[in-house]
Structures are given as structure tokens and as C-alpha cells.
Image: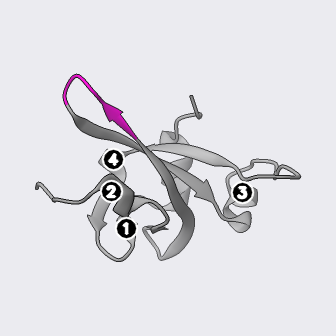
Amino acid sequence: MVVGIRPSELEGKMVIAKGAKMLGTISSIEIDCSEWKVTHLRIALTDEMIKTMGYKKPFLGSVGILLSVDAVKDVGDVITLNKTVEELKDVIEPPK
């Protein structure tokens, strides 16, 4: 499915994992310039998800993760994922 949406419209959208768990918000996207495709979403985790995912919250700033767009189920007012938080722990890529 092809959706016409500007990259700037994704920034700040909430990301909801399967099971209705709030993961965080989109802070940016990664694009494969050779194919002109969005490949990953960079998500700023909520404080609760930082703990759940096993990260340490920094004094300033937030924890960001890279998530492949393959995990996206739907894009609307929020971005819903096709994976639970537990499943995401196995597929999250470290920030570049």
C-alpha cells in the first residue's frame, strides 16, 4: 500500500504497539536515497518504555530507537504497530 504523506507530518505522531501500549513519538525518519523509500522510524521513547525496554534514562534528553517500517501496521492520527512491546525488543536496531 502506498500512502501519500509528507515526512514532516510524521514527526511528533504517537507510536502505539500492539496491545495498545504507548511506545513514544516519532522524532525523525531514515530514507534509503537510492530507492527513495522510508526504511526506519526514529522513536523517542516514553519514560515508561525506557524502563520496560531496559534502557537507562539520561539526565537530559531522551532515548531514541530505530524501528524498521516493516513493523508499521497503520498510519493515521497515530502510528500503530503490528508487534507487541516484547516482540519489539528483538527487532529494535541501535541508533546510528
In percent of width and height, residue 76 lies at 29, 73
Q: Kindly identify the amino acid type of the residue bearing the numbered disc 2.
A: Val
Q: Which residue is mark 1?
A: 80
Q: Nearer the viewer, residue 2 or 88?
A: 2
N-terminal label among 2 and 3: 3
Q: Is tag 1's residue or tag 3's residue first in the polypeptide sequence?
A: 3
C-alpha distance separating marks 3 and 4: 20 Å
Res. 38 image quadrant: top left
Callout 1 crowding tier (Cα within 10 Å): few <14, some 14–19, many ≥20: many
Q: Are marks 1 and 2 in contact (CB under 8 Å)?
A: yes
Asked which secondary structure carries label 3, the reply is helix
Relative depth, front residue between 74 and 91: 74
Q: Residue at the spot x=39%, y=73% of the render?
A: 78
**Residue plotted at (29% across, 66% down):** 75
Check disc 3: other Cα within 10 Å, few if <14, some if 14-19, many if 20+: some
Task: Read off the residue under disc 3.
Answer: 50
Q: Measured from the top left, where is residue 65 in percent x and y?
A: 57, 45
Q: Which residues are magenta?
A: 30-35
